[in-house]
Image (cartoon, grey):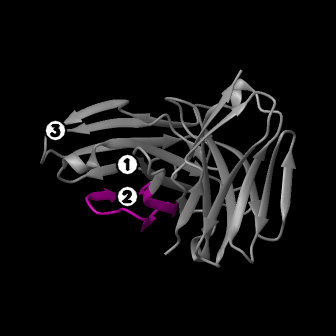
Amino acid sequence: GENVEQHPSTLSVQEGDSAVIKCTYSDSASNYFPWYKQELGKRPQLIIDIRSNVGEKKDQRIAVTLNKTAKHFSLHITETQPEDSAVYFCAASGGHNYGQNFVFGPGTRLSVLP
Amino acid sequence: NAGVTQTPKFQVLKTGQSMTLQCAQDMNHEYMSWYRQDPGMGLRLIHYSVGAGITDQGEVPNGYNVSRSTTEDFPLRLLSAAPSQTSVYFCASSYGDGSSYEQYFGPGTRLTVT
């Protein structure tokens, strides 16, 4: 089955700097890759996603890149702000239950220091 | 819209007891899922459903049952609670029509098994 690894497990950056979180997946049939943000004590919320027919997607300060050949995808946050502090999860989905059967990475705790 | 609702918010069970975690959504979503979240392990899929009457196992289904008799409701049953089932449980739903696979999470149920 699918296996998703995520690095680093914790990341501290100064406010205004960029943050990069990387994920790798094992199943070449996976073709949908979302990123979720979870603030302390709250539910996960989707921040950006990418499908396998696209190499990069951007939404304001957030971008995701996908390399299908190498089976890895990354989240990039620019001009970080204290409210970006949270746990970020990547996930992969594919196969006959595409868009439903998700495997999540273990998460990255991002701290943005003022 | 209330979105995705879960009850109860907190629950303490003794080993061997059974209970049902309730999940409901009012967005007419076809897809619904149950996840458990343990520290350092991300979100792991327990069971999911792609429509009323259709369910399938996820990554960690043992010890849990589900059914989907209506589009709105997707209860999760713990058959005989064990301390290893101590976790935070999230229900999620999504459209499943191909336009978006964003999962909307409920607020979670924190379960402790003693």
Q: Amino acid at mark 3?
A: Thr
- Label 3 vs label 1: CA separation? 22 Å
- Dot 3: few (<14), some (14–19), or many (≥20) neighbours within 10 Å? some
**Which is in the foreground here, disc 3 or disc 1?**
3
Answer yes or no: are tags 3 and 2 on the same subunit: yes
Residue at x 13% of width, y 45% of height: B15
The numbered mark 3 sits on a residue in which chain? B
Q: Going from the N terminus, do you reach mark 3 or mark 1 first?
A: 1
In the figure, residue A30 lies in which quadrant?
A: bottom right
- Dot 1: few (<14), some (14–19), or many (≥20) neighbours within 10 Å? many
Residue at x 52% of width, y 68% of height: A3
Residue for badge 3: B114
Q: Going from the N terminus, do you reach mark 3 or mark 2 first?
A: 2
- Label 3 vs label 2: CA separation? 26 Å
Instruction: Compare residues B7 and A44 and report the one nearer the observer.
Output: A44
Assess whether mark 1 and mark 2 are in contact (beta carbons under 8 angstroms).
Answer: yes
Q: Amino acid at mark 2?
A: Ser
Would residue B32 be counted in the magenta stretch?
A: no
Residue for badge 1: B75
- Is residue B73 found left or right of B81 in the rendered image? right
The numbered mark 1 sits on a residue in which chain? B
Identify the element where label 3 is drawn. Answer: loop
Would residue B47 be counted in the magenta stretch?
A: yes
Q: Going from the N terminus, do you reach mark 2 or mark 1 first?
A: 2
Residue at x 37% of width, y 58% of height: B67
Q: Position of residue A104 (x, y in %)?
A: 54, 57
